[in-house]
Image: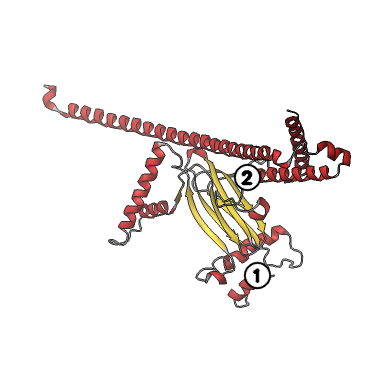
Amino acid sequence: MASLFRSIAILFTILCLSEQSSHARGADSFAEYVPITYKLNQKRTECIYEVFEKNDFITFSVFIVEAMNNGAPIGDIAFEGPLSGNPDIITKIEEITSGQYDNNYDGESSQNPSLGRQLKKGTTSHWPIIKDSDKKVRYDKRMGIINRSLKVDWTHAGESEDAVAARSQIEAEKREAYRNKGRGPPKIDEESVAQNDRFKAKIMSKIEPYEETSPVKAAGWYRLCVSSHYHALMVEMEIRGGNRMGGIDRRTGHVHTYESKEMLDAEKRWNEGIVEAKSKATALTEEEKRALENQVKEQDLHASKSQITHLNSMVTEIKKSHQEFHRRIRSHKASAARNYESMIWSSKLETALYIIITAVQVYTVRKWLSGNALLGK
């Protein structure tokens, strides 16, 4: 019993040291991280920028929280870079333009340009020239340009019967269109174009962010852009770097999220607390060492350490599940609002058609009765 109390005392000391270490690193902790939500007005584009070093990993993450005015949660997503901050860009541009490109053609000072001017110039002047420079180039000869754009649709995401049936129908239409490809003359009407765009869209099956991860072969500034269509959107988007977030998560294949980074930091603080406790134990006097000899051994704390690590991972999973549950609630609420709005418009249309048909019938019967001479006798 006495050894148990001594083990608990040492464990408590390590936890206190770990807690002090966490306070000292409060600036690097993501415990209070809340995703930033951006509002995109109708037919507008919002971009975020982040700088990365070479040989890093970059993860782009986008989630459409809600479409305003009961619209569809569909958005165009673009991953692009490097836009600026890389001297190889100017060299590549001069190579493409055969030396005809003037880097100071717009009158800007090339000595100490501001970050805003660098990004603006990179977006408007450099990027249109180099964005396709890696196409049809052997992989080991590529500069490392990331130029990817796609449309992502969360309209039918989720596990409800309607969502599953809608996704199955879209997949069946895609297979049918693939089988019919090349048969007969090509159709260029608006309906065919809209159907083609629908088939090219990425249909999300789960209510979760859409993520893509790429290695950074070229250092510089990268950006993530989301564009809305006919409705305003509420969008969560972020760019995560492997060096800053602790590398790639083996479970997801993407850079660690802020929640998993918090778990890694907690485990690191725990290990540092054990090391610090050991270093303090070596500084004891001979009498204190003899008093503590054979009382508490290192293996006595292995079970406690494994339990705390397991508890830490469980807390992280609970936070992740809570966030996913919150997303599902907002998504289901938006879906219910869209269905309700659709039902209201259908009811109004049916009522209007009924009134029009009834009026036409009354007018026709009355005209027929007033013009029939036989009924008047």
Query: Judging from the image, what secondary structure is the residue with disc 1 in?
Result: helix
Residue 228 image point, x, y percent: 52, 48
Query: Residue under circle 2?
Result: 260
**Figure quadrant of residue 280:** top right
Residue 83, relative to residue 247: is it above or below? below
Dot 1 amino acid type: Asp
Q: Residues within 10 Å of mark 2 (few under 14, many from 20)?
A: many
Q: Disc 2 vs disc 1: Cβ atoms closer than 8 Å? A: no
Of 15 and 372, nearer the camera is 15
Spatial CA distance of label 2 from label 1 is 35 Å
Of 194 and 137, nearer the camera is 137
- Circle nearer the N terminus (2, 1): 1
Q: Is residue 247 left or right of residue 6?
A: left
Of badges 2 and 1, nearer the viewer stands 2
Q: How crowded is mark 1: few (under 14 residues within 10 Å), some or many (20 or more)?
A: some
Residue plotted at (41% across, 51% down): 198
**Figure quadrant of residue 167:** top left
Query: Judging from the image, what secondary structure is the residue with disc 2 in?
Result: helix
Query: Residue under circle 1?
Result: 88
**Figure quadrant of residue 326:** top right
Residue 316 image point, x, y percent: 61, 39
